[in-house]
Image: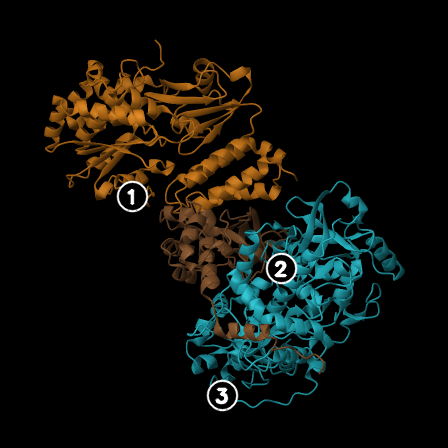
Amino acid sequence: MDVLNQVILHENSRVGPDLEAWLQVGGEGLQIALQDATVLIPLIKEAGLRGLGGSGFPTHYKWAAVAEQKHSNEKYLICNGNEDEPGTFKDRILLEETPNQLIEGAMIAAVALRINHIVFYINPDLEDAIANIQRAIKQWKVTELYFNVSTHLQQPLEFSVLPASGHYIGGEETAAIETVENKFPFPRSKPPYPAENGVHGCPTLINNIETLCHIPHIVKNGAKWYQDLGIGEACGTKIYSLSGDILSPGAYELPMGTSLDELINLYGGGMLLNKKFKAVFTGGPSNTILTPKDLDVPLDFDSVAARHSNLGTGAMIVISEGTGIVKRVAEYVGFFAHSSCGQCPSCKTGTYYIAMLLNKIDMGLGRRIDLDALIHLCEILPGSGRCPLINGAVKVLESSLYHFMGEYEQSLID
Amino acid sequence: MSEKLVNVTINGKKISAPASLSAVQAFWHAGYTRVEGIGCMEGVCGSCRVMVRRVNKKEVRMQLGCQTFIEEGMQIIFLAFPAPTHHAYQLSDMKNSWDVHSQFHKTFPETIDCRVCGGCTQSCPKDIEVQRGVELAAKGKFREAGELFIECVMCNLCMTACPEHIAPNHVGLFCRRVMAYFHLRPANLITRLEELRQGEMDVRTDN
Amino acid sequence: MSKGIPYDEALKRYQHDKEHTLPEMNEILRDYHPDYYPDSLVKLQVGINKGDLCHRQLAEMLQADARIDEADLAGTSITETNVLVIGGGGAGSAAALTAARNGASVILATKLRLGDSNTVMAEGGIQASIESGDTPQAHYDDTLKAGHNKANKKLVARMVMDAPDVIRWLIQEGMQFDQNEFGDLLTRRPGGASANRIVYYRDYTGLEMMRVLRESVSNSNIEVWDHSPVVELLSSETGHCAGAVIYSVEERTYKMIKAQAVILATGGIGRMHINGFPTTNHFGATGDGLILAYRLGAKLRDLDSFQYHPTGVAYPSHLAGSLITEGVRSAGVQLLNALGERFVDELKPRDYISAAILRECAEGRGVVVDDQTVGVWLDTPNMELREPGLMKQRFPKLFHLAKRGNLDPTKKPILVYPALHYQNGGVVIDENGHSTIPGLYCVGEVSGGIHGRNRIMGNALLEIISFGRRAGLQAAQNLSARGHKKSGIEHLTKLRRELSRANMPMDVKSPMLFPACANFELE
């Protein structure tokens, strides 16, 4: 059986904004959900669905936390499509090619948690995605299914499409909430968590696009089916955004736990110009590094974490021998420095300073004292910000120091 | 005097030094070399910026190294960076005081983008209300804005903290300079200059 | 240092509302001023000032070997400019700005960063005779008298005549000064002066001046080289000063800057800790300029005369040497000994007051803390009693300092002791800051002759701008069409011969560049 693009990127799912075409294969999940909403959270839990926007946090926890907020008549779901990190391009495909799959997933969540506001929060650069979602919503709103959902909720289900502010930090949960409230995307301190106090103080669920796209299929086919899609302990499928010095870059939906070797050499067609594989930057809220000795690692959250790295969003940026690690890390940290919102000086100035030291070392002007400072910064900075951005910036540095200390040392003058 | 030793980490070096020492002195005390980013050692030149994390504290603070006295478990990183401003202007390019407002926005166009994140104010080791100064300057209230920056030592920490590249310290200094350039016209000084111009005030050196 | 009265006991004797009569003072300078410490002076044995008295520590540096020789210059990068300014304080900035505005290409090289200097720390203010009851003549007379009539009269005359225009110039650079409600500049009286003559901005006069000058330099076409201490000057075949060799601290390499004129504005010697005194000076004040100029053959003067600021903080010890501005005494704050008695007129010149404090301490009337620190009271609470709130408004920096020492100056007097503050002498210059070596100008603290043997408050900030501008203009106007044919360090050969003949220890190297505490070594 071909394991490539089995579920959410299956050709049957990629029908664009045409709702009728989607309902040929979809819609069943929502119907099942409407029959008995109480089974949904246990089902998601059993299926082992985890947050695919980078956190890997079990989805059922967030759902349960919002479901518990029974006092509130107003609840929000933010479908997080702010996707902006280097090397990640999966949500864009899902938004453009499978908007109905996403909307159905979001509506199931609404049924499960009694959510009456669904906000599609999308990177403003993705104009086609925004247009397709809007077209799809229009079609949904005149269906019987939509009417049934509103009846179930005892109030009309509202959809809105909100282009994000264009800031990377807007992808952070609380920053997304600020944006929905029409404010600058400054992350808030947690607690309180969005599940208790989100948009306008209402309980709010924030799920990544890819996570939500899985929902209709899980509800339709069952938890066992979803578990079995993954390899070993891992459940379901994952879209890997493969890029860099590779023959065939692209988005590949594969069983969760596919090995790095298979992804690069089988699906990616091997290294470009047959160069030697040096490392892969796994992308997401924090970038980490895998090296040739990790080619056997199953690409699921826990297996990658066991190698001091993060699966993140499933972005895999492959680099070959001859590419400088320090330069690449400097670029990543530069990205974080640019993206840092400014609220926490340790984050803004810290990332700026790390990037400056990295550039200095990359240009061959670095000294031992600069490297010592970088190592020390990895200790001082994590946890000092109100959101995890600074942790992400430090993580990529730390990971590169862990795997490539020799390369750093070779670049020093003394 | 009993000199209690405390343990700190500075730029990755574990150091034991008397608690009365500043971060700069402690680093030297341990035998390490540091000459860049050291200046007046009295907190007015702004060269010895540090990031400080105290034990069991989540927050990382921006301070001046010569004004930071070491405490047990403190973690300190020197921040030595060049910080050239990209905001160039000549006071003499401004025709008169009516021209200041437009010149300000030409020189500092980013001030209207201030996202009010508060990072500049939090970064300031002199507790200046930096963000308020930027807001006042953007509104053309140069006197009020400049008054807030009296104690600014141009350490540039607010500049690196600003996500919109505003360079608040230079905004403050601009405000102060235009006030002097256009509005400081002391009669006692001007009178004396005129007397000197008339040759009425020569000095006899033969006594 | 156990002689004296313990802190707590002295604090009990202290009364903040007491009236005082002053003791007689004869020969106090000769008996108590550190310039007269026995064995502190030697006669120079090499160079143009051979035979002159010089402080032992400075003599050691003046008669040391150079740090470089020809081999160090092989393959170094060479940059050319019209005018090279060495030093990034107020004097260097004023000189660089003036030279650049008069058409010269200018490089400003500085050991620390532009603005990291003694200028930025100056608190008290700047002298200019602008009040109706005052005249440049009075300014001249006061300066000469405070300097024990040892100053170069022509230089002083130039400076006092320049003073009002210096203030105008600073205002046009965007510097603020404190004003009264009518817009007149406020003035206060410096110790040893006959009139109110100090103009100021709070107790941040130097900070205000320096940040304005730094901004002016940054906004000009002057090329600034930070972290670039000069290790040697360059000489031409005709004996002109022809540039300098700098050491790039960032790149750890020597570089040559060839110039048609060099303006030395390297400041003073506080970090030499003459006679073991703490200093009010910044980290880079190691007297390098004196050594560099002397090697080229420039005449120096008054090498045995230093200023000890009377009110350096003595306690708490981590603030030792921190300056409390003379402005505080100008405003009426008095000095008291451990018996709670006033012992000197606080508005006398600085050398006199420092000597008086040292006498109190030497004769057992000092306040002693922990058997190792001694000092006298600066009676700030009395001032607070007479004019509540005034100190806090006028002297914010004092209150910051006190806060760092966990002191409240309105409640408890501050313990002070003299601190090494200023080098009175320096390189001999003419009215345009020109030294006795063609092409070499010296301005600011590195120059000598303006203050005689004791500087009066407010003349340092005046001097740096007055002579900085003069030298900058003169240098820019006297550029020859062609540069020097040769420029190198041949003059060091002569120096080494002389040192060898005089049996000087050749293992001592100078200039000092950085204080020993920073553990710096050239690579």
**Residue at (67, 74) in percent of width and height:** C157
Residue farthest along the front direction in this orientation? B198
Is label 3 in a helix, a strand or a loop? loop
In the rendered image, what is the letter of the chain coloured cyan? C
Q: Is the residue A16 above or below the residue B165 in the image? A: above
Residue B200 x %, y %? 60, 78
In the rendered image, what is the letter of the chain coloured brown? B
Mark number displayed over residue C283: 2
Q: In the rendered structure, which amino acid carries the disc numbered 2?
A: Phe
Query: Which of labels 1 and 3 is toward the front?
Result: 1
Is label 2 in a helix, a strand or a loop? loop
The answer to whether marks 1 and 3 sit on the same chain is no
Can you see residue B6?
no
Closer to us: C203 or C66? C203
Q: How far is mark 1 from mark 2, CA to CA?
A: 47 Å
Query: Is A260 displayed left or right of C323 in the figure?
Result: left
Image quadrant where residue C145 sits = bottom right
Residue behind mark 1: A183
Residue behind mark 3: C18
Q: How far is mark 3 from mark 2, CA to CA?
A: 40 Å
Q: In the rendered structure, which amino acid carries the disc numbered 1?
A: Lys
Is label 1 in a helix, a strand or a loop? loop
Count neighbours of disc 1 (C-alpha within 10 A) and say few if under 14, some if 14 to 19, many if 20 or more: few
Mark number displayed over residue A69: none
